[in-house]
Image: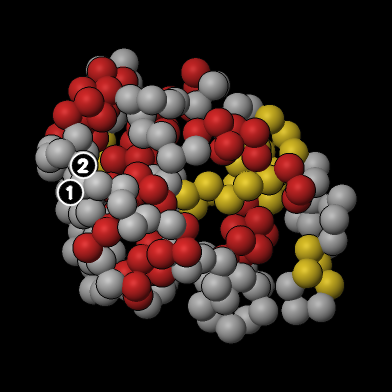
Amino acid sequence: MGSSRLPGGGSTAAKRHRSPVPADRCLPVQAEGSREGYSREQFKHWIDADHDGCNTRNEILLHEATVAPEVTGRCKITKGTGTWWSWYDEATLTTKDDVDIDHMVPLGEAWDSGARTWTAAERQAYANDLDDERSLLAVHDSANQSKADRDPAEWTPPAASARCRYLADWVTVKTRWRLSTDTTEHAAVKKIAAGCADLRITVAYAR
């Protein structure tokens, strides 16, 4: 259980790697598309891709636990066991009920930035991306709910220590999935990056 969460270990399309580049120079800038037609159901998520009994949510809970939870059956995580560190807000979480699995680039933002033209299979792969550990993460539910579908122009993690990592991971995921950025978001990315020392990323493309 949890073993499938390995970079490059999944079934997405052949990947190409790029050398480390400044995070604020990666993304194409263009106007966002319409939110019309969007729903979370357009991105089938929390599937059990490798049929080991663990869906995507539980794979991440197991992988990111700082203290491993108890597991019964094929992959049932016992409530009240395990510990998780939410780096968005520097919170220690001791029950899975307080943990949300966050899409680094939210589903609605992905839709606006290009995913509306993808196939259903591509959107499913995006929503369950276990091949890059920056795509999905276990965080405090309150922080995730505060973030919602907002981009870095509208939301950054409450912990100042998290902002450079957040920006790098945001740009990595958008680049990995060939998503665009609008002018307001791009300006925010450049502004935040200016306060981060030599912020460079390496990307394995998913599509």
Q: Position of residue 147 (x, y in %)?
A: 50, 33
Observer-side mark, 2 or 1, equals: 2
Q: Position of residue 86 (x, y in %)?
A: 62, 36
Between residues 24 and 152, which one lies in front from this camera angle? 152
The answer to whether 11 appears left or right of 139 in the picture is left
Identify whether 13 is placed above or below 154: below
The answer to whether 140 appears left or right of 170 in the picture is right
Counting residues from the start of the chain, the first of labels 2 and 1 encountered is 1
Judged from the image, the secondary structure of the residue bearing numbered disc 2 is loop
Judged from the image, the secondary structure of the residue bearing numbered disc 1 is loop
- For mark 1, does the 10 Å Cα neighbourhood hold few (<14), some (14 to 19), or many (20 or more) residues? few
Q: Position of residue 207 (x, y in %)?
A: 23, 66
Residue 16's quadrant in the figure? bottom left
Residue 150's quadrant in the figure? top left
Name the kind of residue labelled 1 in the image.
Ser
The answer to whether 21 appears left or right of 51 in the picture is left
Colouring used for the render: secondary structure
Q: Quadrant of the N terminus?
A: bottom right
Q: Is residue 45 visible?
A: yes
Q: Position of residue 11 (x, y in %)?
A: 37, 77
Name the kind of residue labelled 2 in the image.
Glu
* Residue underneath mark 1: 19
* Residue underneath mark 2: 32
Residue 24's quadrant in the figure? top left
